[in-house]
Amino acid sequence: MGVGRRMGKKQGIPEPLSEEHFANLKRKKGIPVDEPQSEARSSKKQRTIKKPTKSLKTQDEPLPKKSAKPANGAKKNSAAQTNGTKSQKSQPKKAPVPVDSDEEMDDEFDLDEMEGSDLDMEGQELGSDFLDSGSSVYDSDQEEAKREKFVFSDDEDDEEDREEKLTAANIEGLSRKLDKQLEEEAAENEAELREDALQTNIDGDAPEVFGDEDEDELSKSKGLLAPDLQMLRTRITETIRVLEDFANLAEEGRSRAEYTSQLLKDICAYYGYNEFLAEKLWNLFPPREAFAFFEANESARPLVIRTNTLRTHRRDLAQALINRGVTLEPVGKWSKVGLQVFDSSVPIGATPEYLAGHYILQAASSFLPVMALCPQEGERCLDMAAAPGGKTTHMAALMKNTGVIFANDPSKQRAKGLIGNIHRLGVRNAVVCNYDAREFPKVLGGFDRVLLDAPCTGTGVISKDPSVKTNRDEKDFQTLPHTQKQLLLSAIDSVNHASKTGGYLVYSTCSCCVEENEQVVQYALSRRPNVKLVDTGLPFGKEGFTSYMGKEFHPSLKLTRRFYPHLYNVDGFFVAKFQKIGPTPPNAVRANGNAEKGSQSFAAAETEVIDKTPITEDDEDEKEKDDFGGFDEEQDQDYILRAKRNAMRRRGLDPRALNYKGGKKEKVDKEEDKKDGEGQKSAKEEKEHKVEKKTDKNQEKEAEKPKEAKKEKASKKEKKAGKK
């Protein structure tokens, strides 16, 4: 039979690829090209391409025996060659069946004869009998040659998933394997980045933190240029590592102070702090934690909103905002009204829910003072620095619009925003006032609970106001703590210690510095022995300092709580809760500084006795001429003093302090009430002596009255006689 119709149009065996092609593939994959190995491999491939005819066998024909010879050897060889070419094209359609190793070709098919026949048959056309046979031929050597064309290194031969097909059966396994590979790569990349950032020295040698003198001079000459941030960060991490293990990693002849000063300079250059504030914040933490604190101040805190429970519930508010395209979740288990906003397609401060007063934009740390104060329904509360109204409205929501809240703020401009938020959120039990909070015990007192969120330097909210890094200096840390101490004493005096449900005060600041927190609380405890610190009731937070930089504080300061941005992802905050257990002592130092100052003024007031009751002759004459018979001044004075004492009790003040005013004594104190009978008699005798003097004068006046009357009559008569 001749060649078939379609057979003539088919191509023959493709030419082997050149070594340049393999070299280009290797270069694309990033594999180094080795010329000698490539030549050896190419020669091996050529031999394997010529070899396949030695082990060719069909599935349909039985294996020949060694003693038998085929009738047409040449024809059979040509058929085998054609079958070899066909098998290369028919492999993808039908699975190959390998021949067992025990079944081999006869010895008569020698290698030399087969290679010669291959060379002779290269130019001949394929026979038509190959198309008629439906057998498929498998050639193991040819398969190996085919695999070797795609192998660029010896290691890749062992990969199981190189040419693995994706089917429904193995898709789960392949995806699992792929995920595992991605995880391993991510872990390796993270470890590499960590090593690059820290430049960990495996041998344990000390890192070179201090440069040479030439480098220092060069850096000074280039001071106007921008610093190398990557170099600064690397040096900061190395210095921190040295400070953590100073004994092993420090350079010889270098002290800890030198490393610390170098680190503070790098922090000032990298983060933009002034040296004073950087050192003050650095002293609050260990080296590694201080670095985390500075890093946390560079990123903004999450946006948090507080649900107004006077108008809605948190679940309903969350569903309404989600429907508007807001991504949010509860701020934490510690709050039942907070929601943390991650993303929003609408402005959070302009939604219908916001305008309707369903929520207010408020930092998560601002929830904490009100949670610690825990106002009850029907109480009388005071917010001494209320603007812009977040804490005031939170108190009103906890009190369910019962009782009364006095929201005070010394700034009239800020009070306008306070009034707006009170109206928007539906608060009906608040009274807004504009006083200096240091005068508040005189204005109004006797509150069940008082909240004082004192003005501070703002070192806990640097992420919101980066200008704090350079604006705060030593003068601010002297003036502001003085004002905070005055405000705290005023707040203590405004609390009613006899309250059945309250008698509590919460002091809070948005600062992390000890000068504005623990030192102020320690001052209040020393000046007001009638208060004590109690537990805040907050579920998280670090304890306050009991010792700092050689200063010792009261052990009860452990009950205060500190909040840091790098630990809790909230603004830096400080919260302390007091309980007033008694009235303010009479010798207490007032907040305004106009009253007594210590025990010396108290002793001076005891020695000085001044009676300010006026004694005039005209008043005595008028009293005698009065139809009502005059007033009993002593009895009236008792009524007046009793009314003043009751008013002071309502304000939370000690009524005994009424005996003293401005260092002068108005009335005899209780020590004179305890005098013996002789002292009382002497006082009575003095009063009687005064009364006798008054009566003698009155008698003399009465005796002179008729004489004066006679003189008047005589003068009248003389005038009449002169007229006539």
Image: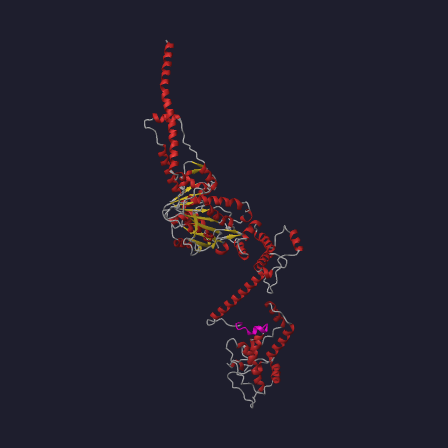
- Can residue 150 be seen in the rendering of this structure? no
Residue at the image point whose x is 35% and y is 32% from the top: 632
- Which percent across, then down, holds residue 256? 59, 56
When asked about the image quadrant of residue 617, the answer is top left
Q: Residue furthest top?
A: 724
Q: What stretch is highlighted in magenta?
A: 151-162
Q: Is residue 498 above or below residue 706?
A: below
Based on the picture, tell me whether residue 157 belongs to the magenta stretch: yes
Q: In which quarter of the image is the N terminus?
A: bottom right
Query: Relative to 714, is 635 above or below?
Result: below
Residue 720 appears in the rendering: yes
In the rendered image, residue 295, in percent from the top left (x then y), is placed at 54, 55
- Is residue 269 or residue 189 the one in the foreground? 269
Taking the magenta stretch, the answer to whether it contains residue 317 is no
Image quadrant in which you'd find residue 262:
bottom right
Where is residue 720 shown, x and y percent of the image?
36, 11
Residue found at the very far bottom of the displayed protein: 67
Most extreme residue toward the front is: 678
Q: Which of 102 and 50 is in front in this view?
A: 102
Residue depicted at 34% across the width and 26% down the height: 624
